[in-house]
Image (spheres, rainbow, N blue to C red):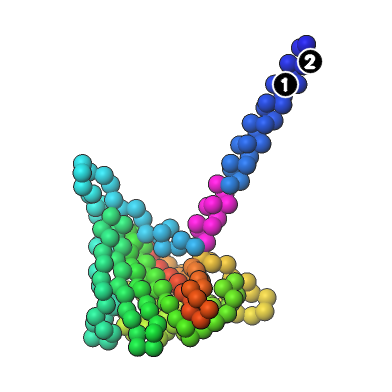
């Protein structure tokens, strides 16, 4: 009888260990996916704290995001500010049908993310080397229209250097182009197929910690 009780308790213990291991593995997998695709969310710190019925904004070294698209170069974009996340976005629509959403935010980092929606390029969304090259092309075409303390030209040049048959690039992988006291780096965050001929490409440039 004692031996039977021992086996029962042992079986229950094994079951609990297996359940705990599965939960841990699921959490790790979810974390990996988030890190790969949510670069701006990872760098834009949470700056809101509950204060009664309202929201209190914590002071950030970089301040509140403002417009960074130069109105003198590009048509006046729409502007939206999410104070709870300290993130601003501007939307531009081009004559060739392309659309660009420029998001900037951050607290200890100055983060700028470009989301291009375009019909100009077409490839498998898993072909990251192809889209890495195209992201450099797209950013280079609009960088002069952006007023931000980031060296987009150096970032584009470094992105173009990531090539070769043996090179593999994972979404969200940092491409450092200034490795001083305050780092600057770029990441290709996401490539999304919107239709048979239209794709969304998201690329981030960041400076920090400030």
Residues 161 and 170: in front is 170
Q: Check disc 2 and report its element: helix, strand or loop.
A: helix
The C terminus lies in quadrant: bottom left
Q: Check disc 1 and report its element: helix, strand or loop.
A: helix
Residue 145, above or below 15: below
Q: Is residue 194 magenta?
A: no
Please tell me which residue is depicted at 79% across the width and 15% down the height of the picture.
3
The single residue placed furthest to the top in the displayed view is 1
Q: Which residues are magenta?
A: 27-36
> Residue under circle 1?
8
Please tell me which residue is depicted at 54% across the width and 67% down the height of the picture.
171
The single residue placed furthest to the left in the displayed view is 53
x and y percent of residue 112 in the render?
Answer: 37, 70
Residue 19, above or below 72: above
Q: Residues within 10 Å of mark 2 (few under 14, many from 20)?
A: few
Please tell me which residue is depicted at 36% across the width and 73% down the height of the picture.
101
The N terminus lies in quadrant: top right
Please tell me which residue is depicted at 39% across the width and 88% down the height of the picture.
96
Marks 2 and 1 sit apart, C-alpha to C-alpha, by 9 Å
User: As drawn, is 101 to the left or to the right of 166?
Assistant: left
Whether tag 2 and tag 1 are in contact, CB under 8 A, the answer is: no
Res. 160 visible in picture: no
User: As drawn, is 205 to the left or to the right of 19?
Assistant: left
Q: Is residue 33 magenta?
A: yes
User: As drawn, is 190 to the left or to the right of 95?
Assistant: right
The single residue placed furthest to the bottom in the displayed view is 96
Residue 9, above or below 34: above
Work out whether mark 2 precedes mark 1 in sequence or the reverse, and give the earlier one. 2
Res. 71 visible in picture: yes
> Residue under circle 2?
3
């Amino acid at each position: 009888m004692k031996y039977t009780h021992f086996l029962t308790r042992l079986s229950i213990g094994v079951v609990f260990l297996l359940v705990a291991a599965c939960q841990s593995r699921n959490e790790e997998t979810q974390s990996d996916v988030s890190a790969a695709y949510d670069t701006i969310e990872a760098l834009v710190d949470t700056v809101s704290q509950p204060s009664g019925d309202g929201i209190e904004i914590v002071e950030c070294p970089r301040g509140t995001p403002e417009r960074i698209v130069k109105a003198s170069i590009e048509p006046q974009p729409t502007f939206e500010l999410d104070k709870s996340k300290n993130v601003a976005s501007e939307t531009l629509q081009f004559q060739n049908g392309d659309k660009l959403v420029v998001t900037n935010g951050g607290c200890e980092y100055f983060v700028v993310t470009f989301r291009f929606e375009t019909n100009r390029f077409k490839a498998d969304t898993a072909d990251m080397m192809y889209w890495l090259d195209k992201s450099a092309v797209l950013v280079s075409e609009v960088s002069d229209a952006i007023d931000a303390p980031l060296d987009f030209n150096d970032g584009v040049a470094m992105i173009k250097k990531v090539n070769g048959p043996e090179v593999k690039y994972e979404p969200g992988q940092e491409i450092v182009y200034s490795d001083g006291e305050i780092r600057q780096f770029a990441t290709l965050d996401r490539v999304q197929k919107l239709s048979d001929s239209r794709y969304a490409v998201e690329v981030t440039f960041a400076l920090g910690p400030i």
